[in-house]
Image (spheres, rainbow, N blue to C red):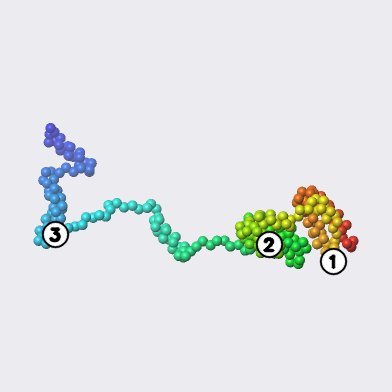
Amino acid sequence: MASEDEMRQMVVQLEAGNKYKVLTQEEYDALLAINANKDLGAEGGVPKPSSTSTPSVSKPDVRPKFGFTFPGPSPIRGLQHFMSSTPQPLNASYATPSYSQPKLPIFSGQDDPPKGEVTYEVWSFEVKCLQNSQFLPEHVLLQAIRHSLKGSARSMIVPLGEAATVADILQKLDVFFGNVSSCETLMQNFYSDFQKEKESIVQYGSRLEQTLSRAIQYGHMDVLAKDAMLRTKFWTGLHSQQ
């Protein structure tokens, strides 16, 4: 068993670290009495006087003993700021993009188109140019096609039904109005053509070029020979050397 001097040295060492405090028996008993009075609801260590009134029953605290906060800015405040900065009406809806309907030339299917109408070759060329465009929806092009067809040409597409596509309409009209002439027929029309009376040289030259273009399109002649043949025939087909 340690002597009294050894006990004093141990106490000094414990208190030197500022972590522990050695109490006497009297000090320890006094602390126990103070803690007991606090548990009874006393102030200053003196118990409260008893009361004859009905003791009130305290409700247990059912609130959670923990909390949680989002790191960084509050997401709720960020959402409130977004909603206030971009107000949306209750009946807001997404607007579909609108397209202006292109205007195609009129085609009625007549062999000699009257004024204001064009041949099938010119009409189909305009349709294919729009069809190759990547910015025009097919339903807009279909509506423009229906508005541009008249007479027998319009009657041809009726049996195709309402679900007909642009390709279906072009395929149907090609059968009836497309150029199905053979190479010999095309070249014969080319060489026998000439400038008509009161016809401008622009109209005459355009007709010759269209004939050669059809021959090239169907593989009847080489594109490299087009310019030379066109210049020769254009000169010899003029009705006046002037």
Mark pair 3, 1: CA separation: 124 Å
Front-most of residues 7 and 148: 148
Q: Earlier in the sequence, mark 3 or mark 2?
A: 3
Amino acid type, residue under disc 2 in the picture = Ser
> Callout 3: few (<14), some (14-19), or many (20+) C-alpha neighbours within 10 Å?
few
Residue located 71% across and 64% down the image: 151
- Residue at the limit of the structure toward the front, as seen here: 159
Amino acid beneath label 1: Lys
Residue 97 horizontal side relative to residue 32, left or right: right
Q: Indicate the quadrant containing the N terminus: top left, top right, bottom left or bottom right.
A: top left
Q: Taking the image as drawn, is residue 188 in sight?
A: yes
Decide which of 169, 190 is in the foreground and name it. 169
On residue 98, the disc is none
Q: Which residue is mark 1?
A: 198
Mark 3 and mark 2: Cα distance apart in space = 100 Å
**Label number found at residue 155:** 2
